[in-house]
Amino acid sequence: MAASSPPRPAAQAVRHLGRFQLLRLLGKSARSMLWLVADPRVGQDMVLLLPRSQPADAAAMQRWLDAARRATRIEHPCLQPAVEVGEHDRWPYIAYDRGSSVTLAERLGSKGLPAAELVPWVLQVLQGLAFAHEAGIAHHDVQAGMLALADNGSCSLMGLGLALPPEGDGGGLPAQRRAAERDVLALGLVLHHALAGTAPLELADTSAVIERIPPLGREIVRLPWTGAHPIPEPLRAIVNRATDRQERQRYRNARTLERALSGWLRTDGEASGGPIVLLLDRMRAAGLLPAMPGGASRAARLASLERERSTGLAEIVIQDVGLTFELLRSVNGTGQRGAMGGGNGPILTVRRTIEMVGIDGVRRTASTLRAWPGPLNEAQASELSALLDRVRLAGRVAQWLRPAGYDPEVVYLLAMLQSLGRLVVQYHFPEEAVQIRRLMLPAPPARTGEPEDPGMGEEGASFAVLGVDIDALGAAVARHWGLDETVVHMMRRVPWMAPVHTPDGDNDLLRLTASCANEVVDSRAQPAHHRLAWLQRVVQRYGRVLGISLRDVQMAAQGMSPNEEPAEHAAGTGAQPGSGHSTPAVVPAGPTP
């Protein structure tokens, strides 16, 4: 018998939706489907987006069409323009040109994407999403498949108008705000997926993940510590904040997440210019800091002075933090110390600075400062004024707690310089400063008897809001001025979680003294029931090195010198002031006075 021929493979069924030939499913979620289709009318491929279920009736279909057409009329370079909004056989759809683009879901592999490649795409999507939110339109179903990546490096968001608000959402401004926050959370999950290479909770559908994390579920989403591509620590803080288990810690809108990612991208690596690029334009327009309140009267006093000892004049100048910093900048810049006869070491006292620039130099510098409060509104100016008070208090505390033999003005200025980053953030980024403080606050316990939720540390909160560490901003300003690395090192506080080691020399001891003083003053910002524990930790960290007691730091935190003996503190303490409180100040061997 002749061998029978092999059976023919069955021809694959060709599926259509109206004129569109369905080629391949690009992605799906609980609410939507993305299909690659061929459109014979134009002879090219398209991307077709459809809801997962048909509208219930003709009225629901009309509502869907009206909402989709209204949403797709919003024009923005980062929102993919729709080619057509229509329906066939009770299936509504939105059609987009495919061109040479691919979706982020198609681009993703198991290794994820490098941060430097991914973040510019996400920033573009955030710009388009923010524009839509400000027009009153939310997306409701942000997925990795909704991000269209073009050959020229641009990225745009598809699907605006595809998913309707959930049933019973109520409408109005609160509903719009909730929907916008959900969109930002969903994009944070997409960012997590793309960086890690694996979907959070192993679920590619962001809607499914949202259902399983607080407040709807109990799962926690955090970036893994290992992966194919390194994730810089500031970026890790940003992404983890976007999906934080505490709702209060997440980004409230697309603009805040965009600013954080943009800050990280602009400051990542020395090639981009570093953190100073965030500040340069604002410093040119508004100066480093404005003149302090009462600057007019101080200027009048300066104008009336002809000959006065530099010590007396320094007492006037040092009341104005902005003026003090500008004078230090003027004499410490690269090449300026030698030209002015200042030697090779950094100048870290106001009196020596005044000797170098003269009374006319002080007047000229004072005249360049912006009048208080610069571009700040009343509430922002109040916050800056309160911070300046704390900074000057830290200077006084550093003087009170300094070990024997160190110039009080040097430790005063170093304590203030350690807050340079905080000051420039409060002045130049006042809205972001509010966010940072909010992220650092602990939250009440979810249930009675449970511990309260801790807030973020300052470094993590700064990463999550600005994309850069506050101390790094202060150091960037110092380097921009031309201060040498010795001073930049002393300006860095000891991290709160880092151990305090025995100092290697004068410069290290000065840094520890200023750092301790700032931690003492920071206790005033803690909730009342946390302050004693905070100060006890300060003493555990610095007590042996600086020779200070709990009583010393408690009185210093209240703004009193430990040498004072008020009646309410005189009895029952059994503690002695630190060793530096009764010793005459002498110039240290380190910085030039």
Image (cartoon, rainbow, N blue to C red):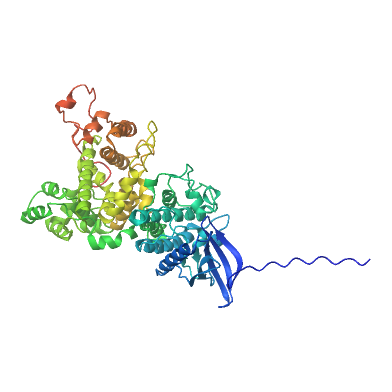
How far from the left and from the top, in percent, is residue 89? Answer: 56, 67
Q: Write the residue at 35% across / 64% down.
A: 135
Q: Is residue 394 left or right of residue 43?
A: left
| Quadrant into which the N terminus falls | bottom right
Numbered-mark total: 0
Against 72, residue 430 (above or below) is: above
Q: Write the residue at 26% across / 48% down.
A: 417
How far from the left and from the top, in percent, is residue 21? Answer: 61, 70
Q: Which sits in the foreground, 56 or 391? A: 56
Q: Residue furthest bottom?
A: 42
Q: Residue furthest right?
A: 1
Q: Which sits in the foreground, 193 or 433? A: 193
Q: Is residue 163 visible?
A: yes
In the picture, residue 538 is in which quadrant?
A: top left
Against 89, residue 431 (above or below) is: above
Q: Is residue 579 visible?
A: no
Q: Which sits in the foreground, 324 or 268? A: 268
Against 436, residue 3 (above or below) is: below
How far from the left and from the top, in percent, is residue 336? Answer: 24, 58
How far from the left and from the top, in percent, is residue 182? Answer: 42, 53
Q: Which sits in the foreground, 245 or 40? A: 40
